[in-house]
Amino acid sequence: MEKSAKKVRVGIIGCGGIANGKHMPNLDKIDEVEMAAFCDLVEERAEKAESRFGAKGAKVYTDYKELLRDESIDVVHVCTPNRSHSFITVDALEAGKHVMCEKPMAINYAEAKKMLDASIRTGKKLTIGYQQRWRPDSLYLKEATDGGELGDIYYAEAIALRRRAVPTWGVFLDEKEQGGGPLIDIGTHALDLTLWLMNNYKPKMVVGTSYKKLGSQTRTGNSWGDWDPKEFTTEDSAFGFIVMENGATIILRSAWAINIADPKEAVCLLAGDRAGADMLDGKLRINRVHNGRQCIETPDLKAGGVAFFAGSSTDSAELEARAWIDAVMEDKAPPTRADQAIVVTQILEAIYESAATGKPVYLA
């Protein structure tokens, strides 16, 4: 559709925490968008979302298939538990809608492949909600890696470690609904960011381990209150050793609860043969040798920068939403391509499989 031709009419499927905390508030900032439909199994949630964000005449549904029958809807945001990402997305694409699906893409590679295939078959755009790419430090480092400043990136760490920050609401602790715990919840962000910065999407072999060491404990000191051990059916930490086809190594570390004093989330470390970079100290650092001396560059990310969109902020979720709507309006590639996101899901599934079997998983 041509930009400014008409409003982009968006339907929200799943009106829970991620929709209210990320998707709807940021879509609401975009003049070219009108949220025209809201669907949730709990009707009151959909009604509340409609009353706050709905355009004039917006409709409320409890059955997402009824929403998809509305031919005036251009775009659907899938903000449901992980288990339902695949079939809702496929149905939406088949109904002629462009789809933003919240991360992770799906609970396994086979389900993600159905999504990718449906997008190709229908010609409709599909993107996955990996907004960490849009942080100022991520964008700066991406420009550096794409420009070859780090050289051949042969070692990386993808880190998403919380000391005690287990999400105790919704279905986060339900392995059936979510497909896993911290690995698929926050490890997925760290891995996506790392692969994107490396521009390397060809995994060869994966070894993984997962643990449930703290999930059965009480008096936990958890940031969001004690969890119920009986409901905690996922891992509380998981780790992966990934070898790419070109020989590069990635170590992935993820946890909702682990006994470390220095937690870090959705950050990475990169080592290339010309320079290295990390986000481990609360800021971006690029290390290199210059004039025969070791030096560290710490860019000031609060000053200057690129104005991606008129009036845009530096908030990553807002920039992602704006880029997504622009991709739809201007018929451009979406901010996170599905053929990239599917590799994240493939690796995560391999880590879980390796952890369960005690054997490496070969992907190439």
Image (cartoon, helix red, strand yellow):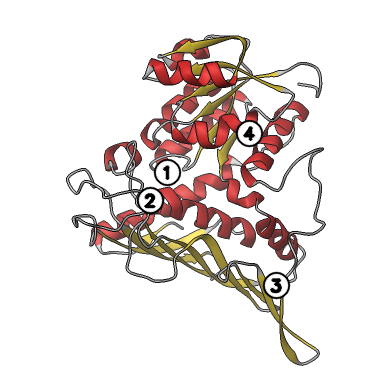
Q: Nearer the viewer, mark 1 or mark 4?
A: 4
Residue 96 point in image, percent of width and height: 59, 18
The answer to whether mark 3 and mark 1 are in CB contact below 8 A is no
Q: Is residue 9 left or right of residue 50?
A: right
The residue identified by callout 4 is 26
What type is the residue that disc 1 sits on?
A: Tyr
Residue 273 point in image, percent of width and height: 66, 79
What residue is drawn where x is 69% and y is 63%? 141
In primary-sequence order, the first of circles 2 and 1 is: 1
What type is the residue that disc 4 sits on?
A: Asn
Identify the secondary structure beneath mark 2: helix
Residue 197 point in image, percent of width and height: 63, 60
The answer to whether mark 2 and mark 1 are in CB contact below 8 A is yes
Mark 2 to mark 1 CA distance (whole Å): 7 Å
Vertical relation: 153 (above or below) 232? below
In primary-sequence order, the first of circles 1 and 4 is: 4
Disc marking residue 109 = 1
**Is residue 39 visible to us here?**
no
The residue identified by callout 3 is 150
Q: Nearer the viewer, mark 2 or mark 4?
A: 4
In primary-sequence order, the first of circles 4 and 3 is: 4
Mark 4 to mark 3 CA distance (whole Å): 34 Å
Identify the secondary structure beneath mark 3: loop
The answer to whether mark 4 and mark 3 are in CB contact below 8 A is no
In primary-sequence order, the first of circles 3 and 1 is: 1
The residue identified by callout 2 is 349
Identify the secondary structure beneath mark 1: helix
